Image: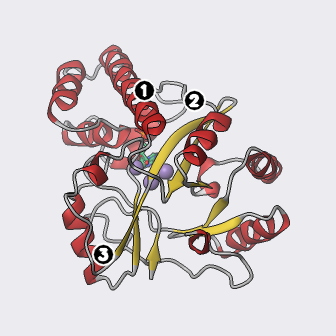
Amino acid sequence: MIDLHSHTYFSDGSLAPLELIDMAVESGLEQLAISDHDSIEGLLSLEQLPTEIRIIPSVEISANWGKQGLHILGLNIDLENEALQSFLKQQQANRKKRALEMAHKLVQAGVEHAKNDIEYLLDSQPMVCRTHIAQLLVEQGYVKKFPDAFKKYLAKGGKAHIKDDWFELEDVIAIIKAAGGQAVLAHPMRYGMGTNKLKSLVEEFKALGGDGLEICYPNIHPGHKNLLATWAKAYKLCGSQGSDFHSPDKSWVKLGKFAPLPEDVEPVWTRW
Ligand code: AMP
Ligand code: MN
Ligand code: MN
Ligand code: MN
């Protein structure tokens, strides 16, 4: 009953932090990591932490490994850490710049009102992620389905794609460690990397001071889960687990619902 990956509307989730916490308590979770993309604002907005559940202050940081974009979870971080806070301010500024660049490319691709619409979003909500832009493209009929917005416009190969241009993995791990957190490679199988490339990433991640791999998450293939568990043991990395919950509308992803961590892998939560 431990879920170490979730989002609120301070990034691309749909719930307020308190709504997410209520849902986690109702789901019977004992621990929940709130891990918004490049932001701890949701956690800072909480006046006090609940007593019914342990909230693990966390963040999901966008990073580059060469040209490859990655998501690195910083679990159990010190929210007061000034280096982390100023780092996240820079990430948020980069996100804003990227959203405006995407708007420009979308207009060029014939999405007429993209510039106004995205500027409006930037003014009216804490963060603009590709998820929000994808939603706009669906609502305005430029694509039928949400994943098509990524395929046609926002993902690699799409008309409004912007290359990943985040801080390097090394710097991201260092900032998480400096803030007292555990650095965990999020959803390793979602990057579309081949096995050899992924293995070298895991090796380098460990060498750079990384703590763990997210091994259990919804829909991971059991064979992939076993492969990650084998690497975790071989490279002395911990295992983590999380739903990557974004919204109750995506009813197929539920808080705390994923296969259990293999017993011979050291759970990351033994570190706190
Ligand atoms: P961003 O961090 O702004 O680049 O947005 C990334 C977020 O978009 C991810 O965390 C997912 O929630 C979502 N996302 C990325 N790729 C896809 C995809 N192919 N289909 C649906 N959602 C996606
Ligand atoms: Mn997301
Ligand atoms: Mn992610
Ligand atoms: Mn996530």
What is the C-alpha distance between the residues marked 1 and 3?
30 Å
In screen coordinates, is 115 left or right of 169?
left
In screen coordinates, is 108 left or right of 225?
left
- Label 3's element? helix
Does the image show residue 216? no
- Quadrant containing the C terminus is bottom right
* Sooner in the amino-acid sequence: mark 1 or mark 2: 1
Residue at the image position 27 percent from the left and 78 percent from the top: 51
- Horizontal and vertical percent for residue 71? 55, 46
Quarter-of-image position of residue 260: bottom right
- Label 1's element? helix
Q: Is mark 1 within 8 Å of ligand 1?
A: no
- Horizontal and vertical percent for residue 268? 61, 69
Which residue in the protein does label 3 denote? 24
* Sooner in the amino-acid sequence: mark 3 or mark 2: 3
The crowding category of the residue bearing disc 2, from other C-alpha atoms within 10 Å (few below 14, some 14 to 19, many at least 20), is: some
In screen coordinates, is 267 left or right of 86?
right
What is the C-alpha distance between the residues marked 3 and 2?
32 Å
Which residue in the protein does label 2 denote? 167
- Horizontal and vertical percent for residue 109? 36, 19
Residue at the image position 44 percent from the left and 83 percent from the top: 1
Quarter-of-image position of residue 111: top left
Residue at the image position 65 percent from the left and 61 percent from the top: 213
The reply to whether callout 3 and callout 2 are in contact (CB within 8 Å) is no
Which residue in the protein does label 1 denote? 90
